[in-house]
Amino acid sequence: MTPPAALIHVVDDDTDHLAALSDLLDAAGHAVMGFTGGAEALSAAALRAPDAVVTDLRMPGMDGMALLAALREAGLAMPVVMLTGHGDVQHAVRAMRAGAEDFLEKPYDAAHLLAVLARGLETAATRSELLRLQTLMQLREAHPILGESAAMSALRDRVAALAPLDVNVVVTGETGTGKELVARALHAASPRAGRPYVAINCAALPEALFEIEMFGHAAGAFPGAQSDKAGKLEAAGGGTLVLDEVEALAPALQAKLLRALEERQVERLGENRLRPLDLRIVTTSKTDLPALVRAGGLRADLYWRLAGADIETEPLRAMGQDIILIFAHYAGLAARRYGRTLPETGFLERRALLAHPWPGNVRELKAAAESFALGLGRAIPTGGDAAPAVTGTGTLPERLAAFEAREIRAALERFSGNTDLAARALGLPRRTLNDKMNRYGLRS
């Protein structure tokens, strides 16, 4: 049986057959969209790609073969099942060579059609998962995103899913959460990896220099322009352009950028010639851009041009034990770079790493790791302990809990985080100690 809830586009100029086939697929548990022409189906697929297409071969205007070719040209690899009432073997061979999943003659057996769809959907799902895993491996090798937490795993999966797609991406998150790393990872694992990677900080771009920097200029366009110069958009040709803090651009500059992106061509200052653009844009920002659009600080049409997909980076404080892993990574890099012996990260250091809120996120952690590797005094911040403090106030259960947390923390410190020895000293079963550590936010 075919997987439920697959989105199937049915295309047939015969409205009676279109309705009957749509009812069949709907009864099989699929979401169905019906179209009486190939051009209409192609436009819908550009907005939201279906999981499979079932199309008649002979239709006025864009027929089934033309629709198949257009879908493949657009980079859409979903299974396409071709139907015909003419039984033309030559057409069948052409369709299969062009990438059709199968070719069925009307009247077809309904069960056979569903089986063909099931096979095609299963093959497509397997191919998609294989591509995701291959991209993930490529991603790890090119620009590793460190961490084993659920947040970091989800981030890696999201980057791996989007990297092969030629879609613009908006990356948002707090300062220092690795937005540039994500942008580089998207480029490194994309088909554009061998082409230029160009980044521009829009907040640092003077308004008077915007057109020169973004669009370039011709020789003699202004005093001092002795030669032609390509702008950032052209320089990223075939590759990836990263726009950092695009919301900092003045409204008039946002409009100029939008026009170039919509027309996919640029005109250098002082030159009466349009140059085509072929690039992918990754936008990075620490601002909630949809909220900024609603407030009128960013053009909605520019945002939607940039936001083909989105990625949100998590703050470091949400990473749990990954904080220790990332700290060790940067400390090791610094030790090798400066030829130093890396000091041991003991229990007290690990506890301090987990207790600190890291308002500067990975950027702050990296600086601390480098100072630690160089032995420059107290490199690891000493934020408040995760466990509650012991005071003489509060209810009796609260004071008992604080006392218990203090004793467990002391035992862990005494045995350098060894929970077996700590549990033995406290007279607790290992599982009970683990439960209490989780309750009080303690780490071994």
Image (cartoon, rainbow, N blue to C red):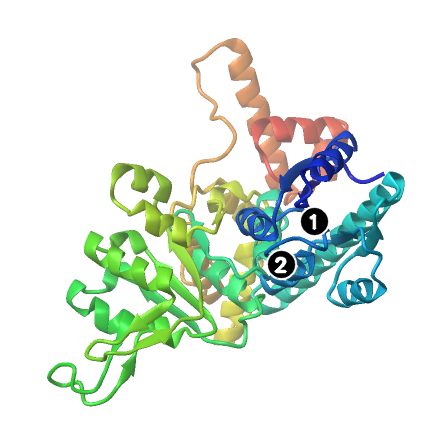
Residue 380 visible (yes or no): no
Q: In the rendered image, which quarter contains the N terminus?
A: top right
Question: Residue extending furthest bottom?
Answer: 226
228, 104: nearer the viewer: 104
Q: Which amino acid does label 1 sit on?
A: Val
Left or right, 258 with respect to 86, comes to left
Where does the C terminus fall, quadrant-wise?
A: top right
Q: Please tell me which residue lies in front, 11 or 180.
A: 11
Q: Is residue 49 above or below residue 376?
A: above
Give how far apart the Cα atoms at labels 2 and 1 are: 10 Å
Q: Which residue, given by chain and number where applicable, does mark 1 sit on?
A: 53
Q: Earlier in the sequence, mark 2 or mark 1?
A: 1
Instruction: State the residue in front, 225 or 400.
Output: 225
Q: Looking at the rendering, which quadrant does residue 205 occupy? A: bottom left
Q: Estimate how packed mark 1 is, as few (under 14), some (14 to 19) or many (20 or more) residues with alpha carbons within 10 Å.
A: many
Q: Where is residue 199 in the image (x, y as percent from the top left)?
A: 37, 67
Classify mark 2: residues with Cα within 10 Å, few (<14), some (14-19) or many (20+).
many
Q: x%, y% of residue 341?
A: 55, 70
> Residue under circle 2?
71
Q: In this view, does 331 lie above or below 119?
A: below
Q: Do the residues labelled 2 and 1 touch (CB within 8 Å)?
A: yes
Q: Residue at x 21, y 76 (%)?
A: 269
Going by the image, does 307 lie left or right of 430?
left
The total of numbered circles placed on residues is 2
Report if residue 89 is visible in the image: yes
Q: Residue furthest left?
A: 223
Compared across the picture, whether 130 is left or right of 195 comes to: right
Q: What residue type is labelled 2?
A: Leu
For label 2, the SS is helix
Picture coordinates of residue 4, whole percent (x, y): 75, 35
Residue at figure coordinates x 22%, y 73% from the top left: 212
Question: Residue visible at 20% across and 56% down?
Answer: 252
